[in-house]
Image: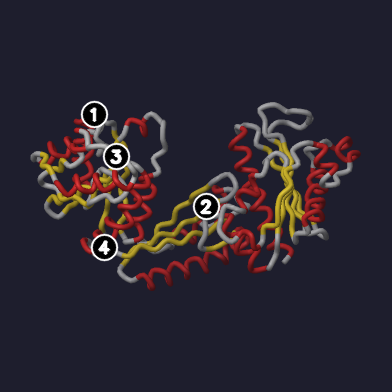
Amino acid sequence: MKINATILTIGDEILIGQIVDTNSAFIAKQLNTIGIEVEEILSVKDEFQTIMEGFGRGISKADLVIVTGGLGPTKDDKTKAALCKFLGCDLVREEKVIQNIMRLFEERGYKRELNNLNQDQALIPEKSTFIQNKFGTAPCLWTKIDDKIIINLPGVPFEMKGLMRDEIIPRLKNQFKSDEIVHRDILISGIPESDLAILIEDWENQLPEFIHLAYLPNRTSIDLRFTASGENRNDLENIIQQEIDSLKLIAGEYIVAENSGNIVEVLKDILLQKKLTISTAESCTGGSVASLLTSISGSSTYFVGSVVSYATHVKTTVLGVNPSIINQFSVVSEEVAMQMSKGVLKVLNSSLAVSTTGVAGPTRGEDSQEIGTCWIAVTNGNTTLTKKFFYPYLDREDFIKIISNNALNLVVQFVKENY
């Protein structure tokens, strides 16, 4: 049976851009693991009537509504009052919630009596049941309306995550018998999204109706995501694999990896499989490539180290870049990128090395190249692959992120071509 959900986040801070709503992404992923599909995500103000309207919209469209935020003790926390109005009931005091708050205070070394605001956290809508929050003072609320459910969670991310994992997901598993949902990600690189869509159009048109294909592009690659739902997980996985095998015959040269939309994980698997190590020499990225490489567990097996050669004299004295090459071609050039990669390969004794040199902006500094220019080089000492990138309209932060990802993509390409 297909079960769908609405996620409702409450808080002015989300709508004014003060914080990013990471709660919804986490909740959606958790629900997906048990076959519950999120149909809609809503964000509303800390306003009584708006919150009530959010409850009404959610419950009219979905089997399950999960709400975060507005359960605190201050005046701008209006969720419980709005829920009471929506349900047509009053608040009642639950002594077990008081006991839980007192336990938390004792554990955290708060040696004082509960004030009125703390006491108010024990007020629960009489038509709801509560789930103790061992991570904080605001309890979770579970409300059944006929065959539908509203769940209210604290907006504090670590409290919400703990409650979702430990309490909500196990209960929902027992409550709903939903279809299996299977996802597969195919990482594509080296072809624009529009060209890819044309290339695989006939193949895409013959996909079964129960398989949904999503294009998730970024500036360096495209994630093709397969989503299928049905009663039998093994059958779904086998059918998706058959479609992927057909896709390989059409676009195999552009497929970087299966089962992953993360270039860092892809590169990890490739380096471990080939028993290769890697080092980085970074100028314009300032260590961001190394940061990506070390962002996952197990990277010490293949990542040797990095030289952040931001200053020109570090390029010449540490990496051995020839000053005459810099004078002739400029710091941001193919020739310098090649010498940087070969230099760090020798200094750190790795199997592979990747280098970046570019102009991130907003000023050119000492270099004559245009803002947004970058050269990346990958080498194993015998063979070197270089590529120029030009992003004149990016701000500094985005430029560094994209170039860092491009560097990893180029390493993947290099290994596939040479090993």
Tell which tag, 4 or 3, sits nearer the viewer.
3
Q: Counting residues from the N terminus, which is met first, the one under dot 1 or under dot 3?
A: 1
Q: Camera-side residue: 58 or 366?
A: 366
Q: Which residue is mark 4?
A: 173
Determine the secondary structure under disc 2.
Answer: helix
Identity of the residue furthest to the left in this view: 89
Q: Quadrant of the N terminus?
A: bottom left
- Give residue 228's position: percent from left, percent from top: 38, 62
Instruction: Inspect this view and state whether residue 416 appears.
Output: yes
Q: Are marks 4 and 1 in contact (CB under 8 Å)?
A: no
Q: Counting residues from the N terminus, which is met first, the one under dot 4 or under dot 2?
A: 4
Which label number is shown at residue 197? 2
Q: Looking at numbered disc 4 in the image, what kind of residue is underneath it?
A: Lys
Q: Is residue 173 left or right of residue 195?
A: left
Q: Counting residues from the N terminus, which is met first, the one under dot 3 or under dot 2?
A: 3
Q: Camera-side residue: 259 or 93?
A: 93
> Where is 324 relative to 49, above or below?
below
- Give residue 243's position: percent from left, percent from top: 47, 67
Q: What is the distance, in whole Å, between disc 2 and disc 1 at their CAs?
A: 51 Å
- Give residue 85's position: percent from left, percent from top: 12, 36
Q: Looking at numbered disc 1 in the image, what kind of residue is underneath it?
A: Lys
Q: Are marks 4 and 2 in contact (CB under 8 Å)?
A: no
Determine the secondary structure under disc 3.
Answer: loop
Q: What is the distance, in whole Å, between disc 3 and disc 2 at their CAs?
A: 63 Å
Tell which tag, 4 or 1, sits nearer the viewer.
1
Determine the secondary structure under disc 1.
Answer: loop
